[in-house]
Structure formats: C-alpha cells, structure tokens
Image (tube, rainbow, N blue to C red):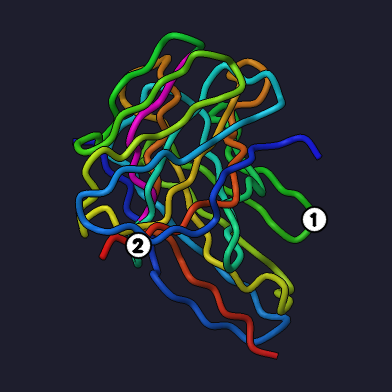
Amino acid sequence: GENVEQHPSTLSVQEGDSAVIKCTYSDSASNYFPWYKQELGKGPQLIIDIRSNVGEKKDQRIAVTLNKTAKHFSLHITETQPEDSAVYFCAAPPRTSGTYKYIFGTGTRLKVLA
Amino acid sequence: NAGVTQTPKFRILKIGQSMTLQCAQDMNHNYMYWYRQDPGMGLKLIYYSVGAGITDKGEVPNGYNVSRSTTEDFPLRLELAAPSQTSVYFCASSQPGQTYGYTFGSGTRLTVV
C-alpha cells in the first residue's frame, strides 16, 4: 500500500546547527511534496513545498530536496533557532491522481537546544 | 482571520455517546478533509470531500460519518463513541489549482472514557 517513511522520529540539535529530516515514499501519481510544521497545541502549518520538476527549493533558512527516481525528499533547516522546535511532517501525493489525499509521515520532533 | 475553524477545542465523551465536531472554512476551498492524529503517529485520513454534496471515505472511516451541505462546512459525526476514538482531530481544506497545500484548523482533542 501507499506509505511514507520519515526519519528520524526525534532530533536534537544545538542552536545554530543544521537539521535534516528525510522521507521516503512508495509511489506517487503527482508531483507535489509539502512539509508541515506543527507547534504544540496547534494544527500543522505548511512551511515549504516542492514540485518534481525541480530538485531543490530554498526559502531563507529552510530548503527541500527531491529525488523522484529514488523516491525520497528531505527538509533542511540551517542556523537553527529555538523557535524551530516543533514536530515536522512530510507528505506525499497518493498513487491515484486527482484525489489530493496526501499521505503523511509519522513526524519528527525537533528540539533546538539553546 | 481567514482560515479553518474547528469547534470544540476539547471534549470528553462517555462510551456510547455521540457528538459532532464542527469545521468551517472561509476561503471558498472545494476540498476538505478530516484527519485524526494519535500520539507518535502521523495523520490518518478519515473522510474527505471534493465539493458540496460529495464525500468519500479515507483510510480510517469506521465509526464516523460526514456531510457536506455547503462549501464552507464539513462536520464530522461520531455516533457511538469508543475509547479507540480518543485522538486529536484536524480538519483541513485546499483548493487544487490554486493552493495544493492544506490549511489546517487548530484541532479538537477528544477523550472517550
């Protein structure tokens, strides 16, 4: 079945260091791969996304890379700050096109230590 | 502020009770979704809708029902609450072609005792 594996499940980094979260998906009919950030007590919020016609996209301190041949994509956060502490989810499109029912990874809890 | 509004934020139900989780969006999005989030797990799709009058099952629909009479509202109904339905429920909306990413509500934390 459709599946998205996300690693690691928890990640602790020192403030100023970089953090990398990786996701692998089993199959996809579409080309849109979003990342969400969930702060404590809140709903997930879209922070960056990438389409499969590009291999990398950057927005200030966050970047996402996509390798569609290998079926994996990664979130990179540079110069981490305490406010980056949250749970991050990747999502991949379903195998069936046109339904937009994204499959979510199990989340990565990022802790940025001051 | 424009977005997805969920009510209530918290609820405790007894086994066998029923309730409706409310979800409303004011962005004129056609697509709406209900997910549940269990501790340490990702988001599992319960039901979704691609427009008013159209709903379909997701990955974990058993024990739930939905309706979509308007574009704005997408309520989720629990008929006979069970402890396995203890979870955090998120409603989301999107408009493919305009914004493929989801806009999520702030969630409803439900405990069934």
Q: Is residue A12 above or below residue A42?
A: below
Q: Is residue B48 magenta?
A: yes
For the point 43% across and 60% down, the residue is A107
Q: Which residue is mark 1?
A: A60
Which of the chains bears the disc numbered 1?
Answer: A
Tell me the kind of residue under disc 1: Gln
Describe the element under mark 2 as helix, strand or loop.
Answer: strand
Q: Residue at x 70, y 68 (%)?
A: A78
Q: How many marks?
A: 2
Q: Chain of mark 2?
A: B
Is A63 on the left-hand or right-hand side of B50? right
Q: Position of residue B60 (x, y in %)?
A: 24, 39
Query: Residue A114: horizontal and vertical position, in percent?
Result: 70, 90
Image coordinates of residue A111 in percent, x first then y, are: 57, 79
In the rendered structure, the answer to whether residue A77 lies left or right of residue B23 reads: right
Residue stretch rendered in magenta on the structure: B42-50
Along the line of sight, the residue nearer the viewer: A114 or B3 = B3
Q: Are marks 2 and 1 on the same chain?
A: no
Q: Tell me the CA gap for discs 2 and 1.
A: 39 Å
State the SS at label 1: loop
Q: Is residue A94 left or right of residue A53?
A: left
Q: Which amino acid does the dot numbered 2 rest on?
A: Thr
Give residue B29's mark. none
Q: Which of the 4 quarters of the picture holds residue B26?
A: top right
Residue B103 within the segment the image draws in magenta:
no
Q: Are marks 2 and 1 in contact (CB under 8 Å)?
A: no
Most frequent secondary structure within the magenta stretch: strand
Q: Nearer the viewer, mark 2 or mark 1?
A: 2
Question: Vertical placement of B29 versus A72: above or below?
Answer: above
According to the picture, the residue beneath numbered tag 2 turns out to be B111
- For image coordinates 40% across by 19% down, the residue present is A99
Q: Where is residue A80? Give x, y as percent.
A: 70, 74
